[in-house]
Structure formats: C-alpha cells, structure tokens
Image (cartoon, coloured by chain):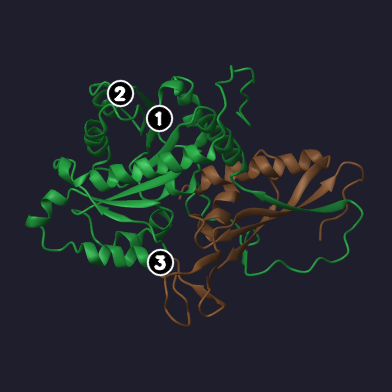
Chain colours: A brown, B green
Amino acid sequence: MHELSVCRSLLEEVERVAAANDASAVEKIVVAVGSLSGVEASSLARTFAVARAGTIAEHAVIEVETVPALVWCEACAIATPAAANTLLCGRCGSWQVELRSGTELVLRRVELTTRASPAAASG
Amino acid sequence: MCEQCGCAAPSEILRVSGRGAAESAEPAALRSVETLTGILHANDHQAAHNREHFGDHAVLAVNLMSSPGSGKTSLLEATIDAIGDRFRIAVIEGDLETENDAKRIRAKGVPAIQITTGQTCHLDAHMVHDALHALDLDAVDILFIENVGNLVCPASFDLGQHANVTLLAVTEGDDKPAKYPIMFRTADVILLSKTDLLGVLDDFSTEQAERYIRALANPAPVLRVSARRPDTLAPWIAWLETQLAARRRSWPRQPYRAQTHVHRRAAE
C-alpha cells in the first residue's frame, strides 16, 4: 500500500495531539500496525523518515508495534495466531472463526516536548 | 542509495518492535501522551458522515472492487438492465483518468459521476463526499461506487458504504483470494465474473477459489455471474434486494431534511 498517504494521515493526527498539548516538538511516536491492516510496518517506518520533513515531528523517531492476526474459535474456546491468508483455528482448522486482532492501524503514543518548559537534553 | 524513497534512512528511525517498552520516569520537559486514534481517522470521520447522508436518504451504498479489467462496469451495465424500473440506481465511477466508464453508465439512462483521481490508486471518503453533492440522493435507491481497479489499496479506505462487493474474473488465477487476503476477507459478496468463458479455460476452479475465500474466515456468498448472460444475474440481484430491504428496516422513517449543516473537510 501507499505508505506515504498513510504517513500524511498519521502526521495529521500527530499534529492534532501536539497542538492539544502545546508542544514545541515531537520526539517519538508509537503506532500499532496489524498484519491485516494493509500497511507494511517497515515500509511505513522508512516512509515516515521522509514524510516527517517540515512538520512538528521532523526529528521524531517512529516505533511500530506489529500486531499479529489472532482468531477466536468458539468450538475450541481458544484464540490462536494465524497467517493473513489462512485464518483458521490453530487447533481444529475451522474457518468459522472470529478475528480478534490484526486489523489495527492506530496511533498509540506521542512523546513530545512542551513549550511550557525549556527543552531538556534528549535521552 | 536512493534519496527519493527514504530507503537509506538511519537505523534509529527504523524501530519495529513487538511490544511497547515500559515507560521510565520522564524529564520535566517531556510529555508522553497515550492515544488510541485510528491513523486514518480523518478518512473514517468523513466516511461516517457519508454513511449518515446515505441513511438520511435511504440509499444503499455498495463499494465495487476488483482488479482492472475484471468486468465491474460491464456488470453494472448488465445489472442496470436486469433491475429495470424496480429500483433507482446511481453510480460513482473512480478511475485515474478518463470519463469512459461514467459515459457508459449514462448511456443506460442512469446518473453517473466520474471521479478522476490522477495518481491516487483508490477512492477515499472525501472524494466520494464531493461526488455525492452532484447527485440527487432523494432519487436514488442503490448507489454503486465503482472503485479504482486495484486489489490492494481500496480495501483499506472506508467510503461510507454499507457493503463491499469484490469481483474475481475467471480469467484471473483462482488463488487471488490467497494472494490478496485483505481485499477478499472484507468482501460481503464475491462475484466470479466472466463465467461465460469457463468452457475455454482449463485452469480456473470455482471450488478452489471458494476454498481460498473460506480460508480467510469469510462466509460471504460466492456467486457465478456473466455480464453477457442475464440469466446468471438473478442471485446477485436477489442479494442486492436483500441488502436494501435490511438497510431500510434499520433506518427510521423520517422526512427529507433540508441541508442546513455546513460541510467542512477535516483538513485540506
């Protein structure tokens, strides 16, 4: 997928959080990307390095948490991890399962420097 | 090293981890803000707005997706013929360039708005919103949104539709659902198109295609259709009628409201 378009949307959300917290700079963002989200984690990270230019997050590090697909099987009463194109119960092989995780495309955390205090040396 | 795409980005940027690290005590100047915001929030917000519009006007909105050339527009032409006067149809067409598809639909006497995306490989909720305002939704029962031909990107962008319809032509590989799991997993119905050609093809198994779809934990009906054989379309039309009836049961009866609210894009 076109990670640049996703990065632009991501930066819109980051800028919203930064504005709400009167930030002078964003130091780090943490996102969660599911295996069924349509976004590839390392590609997103590489594209972010380009897309962040000229924004309040221009020096920010991105940390991408990858979220595996988990399927819940009612018959076995268990959740098992599954590959994106083989969403079957890991125990009985049934396809009549419910997807419990894997579609996430979420901004989880923004670490920023606020204007209220002078910037400390970054760790 | 490529300077265009960022593949030479320094390694401290590329941190792909399985879990977030535990927080240590923050220096005074730093603040950590926990959020749970969808990255595509702006699009999702617009999509929800589109969905409200559809509800206000009792319109069933269907997002039609497939590879380029699988027969989406031909299927729409055949569907328009099959439905006749039973329901009022409108179409939003999405292509990178040309008005060709919208012209074909208009030739059937059905209103069609063409979105030309230029470079963008999928429709998004903002584009659809703009197109909606060129339509009289009071005169529409079913709105088909024919997405850009692409099995990858359209699957991730909510347009405000009520149902996803994905075409898989029998001239494509029957393993496409395994290759493009996100697109086929989220389909509410899958139409195996161009079935009139099955007699000259020896490498497409409809049963195998269906097995791959089930392996995506998708119980959606898999219907065999040919735009050239109107007699194959009955189950597809019946499915549309069922969707429309279900939607109408869920919408409260309300008179049409004048457009008193201001439309504002989330961000330009």
Residue with the mark numbered 3:
A85
Q: Which quarter of the figure has residue B86?
A: top left
* Cβ atoms at labels 1 and 2 below 8 Å apart: no
Q: Residue at x 52, y 42 (%)?
A: A5
Mark 3 vs mark 2: give the one in front. Answer: 2
Mark 3 vs mark 1: give the one in front. Answer: 1
- The chain under label 3 reads A
Residue B79 point in image, percent of width and height:
25, 36
Tell me the CA gap for discs 1 and 2: 12 Å
Image mark for residue B141: 1
Q: Residue at x 45, y 70 (%)?
A: A83
Q: Residue at x 45, y 25 (%)?
A: B131
Residue with the mark numbered 2:
B110
Give above or below for B263 relative to A8: above
- Residue furthest to the left in view is B200
Image mark for residue B25: none
Residue A73 point in image, percent of width and height:
51, 74
Q: Specify few, some or many for label 2: CA neighbours under 10 Å numbering under 14, 14-19, or 20 or more.
A: some
Residue B259 point in image, percent of width and height:
59, 18
Q: Disc 3 residue type?
A: Asn
**Same chain? Circles 1 and 2:** yes
Mark 1 vs mark 2: give the one in front. Answer: 1
Which of the two residues, A11 or B245, is positioned nearer the viewer here? B245
Q: Disc 1 residue type?
A: Asp
Residue B108 point in image, percent of width and height:
23, 24
